[in-house]
Image: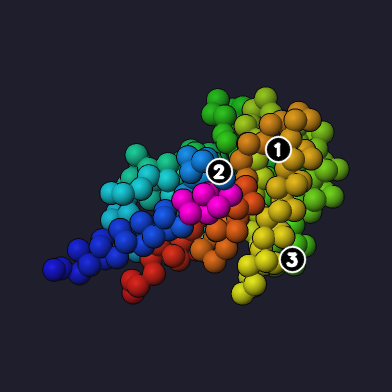
Amino acid sequence: MSEQQDAATIIRNNLRAVRDRILAACDRAGRCASTVQLVAVTKYAEWEWVEALAVQHSVFGENRPQQLAERAAQLPKVEWHLIGQLQRNKVRLALAHATVIHSIDSLRLLRKIATVASETGRRPNVLLEVNIAGEESKSGFSPAELTAAWSDIVAVQQDVNITGLMGMAPASPDTEVARSVFRRLAELRDQLAGTELTLPELSMGMSGDFEAAVEEGSTMVRIGSRLFEGLT
Ligand SMILES: *Cc1c(COP(=O)(O)O)cnc(C)c1O
């Protein structure tokens, strides 16, 4: 077997294992598996691995707009999600290539997106990133900021589809820490939903904590390292 086949086999097995775990978590939570989308995060993946994964899967996430744009040009049939921080000067690039932007971390960025969207006539799907645990190292609205800015946020919905919230749990070996963060994010969504926006999406859960996230209502898990485990 060539090295290429080896990588493809490893990726296929990893993908199957991740999907099985998502299914099992859905079962435990009494949820339908079709309500959870797997966003395969390829930011650290070599191009050959991305191509191998694209045979089996069609929703990918990248951190940087530039790499997303380059890879989207190579694999246009894949649905590309931007999950990392977005500078305002990269909004045009991001909107041209990303189907969903998970990481809107300020009103200023949201307004910039609305401006570019109205100019180009593209109505992007975006999620508002919330820094639930108040971590210094993470960006995002605090829950209080989000609530305070809500009427200004809702005001851009003519140009932008605001479909939900995104959050990350602090890195911790204790999944109960992650679970409580996910629960708080889901509660915040429930509070805000129905006022002006329905907010169906909850983007939460990564390689180390996606099962708890699914049990707490995640509709988009962003998984990278688990899919490429065993490759070097
Ligand atoms: C890298 C990254 C992920 C995936 O992390 P893994 O632990 O590799 O699954 C998910 N979300 C964001 C925002 C990321 O930057």
Q: In which quadrant will I find the C terminus?
A: bottom left
User: For the stretch drawn in magenta, what is the main secondary structure?
Assistant: helix
Residue flagged by tag 2: what amino acid is it? Answer: Arg
Magenta region: 23-29
Between 91 and 84, which is closer to the camera in this rendering?
84
Mark 3 vs 2, N-terminal side:
2
Is ligand 1 less than 8 Å from the beta carbon at label 2?
A: no
Which of discs 1 and 2 lies nearer the camera? The answer is 2
Picture residue at 82% right of the left edge, 48% below the top:
145
- Measured from the top left, where is residue 197 in percent x and y? 71, 31
> Could you tell me if the residues under marks 1 and 2 are in contact, i.e. CB atoms within 8 Å?
no
Instruction: Tell me the residue that label 3 is attached to.
Output: 135
Mark 1 residue element: helix
Picture residue at 57% right of the left edge, 45% below the top:
30
Instruction: Tell me the residue that label 1 is attached to.
Output: 111
In the depicted structure, whether residue 153 falls above or below residue 137: above
Mark 3 residue element: loop
Q: Is residue 27 magenta?
A: yes
Mark 2 residue element: loop
Q: CA distance from mark 3 to mark 1?
A: 24 Å
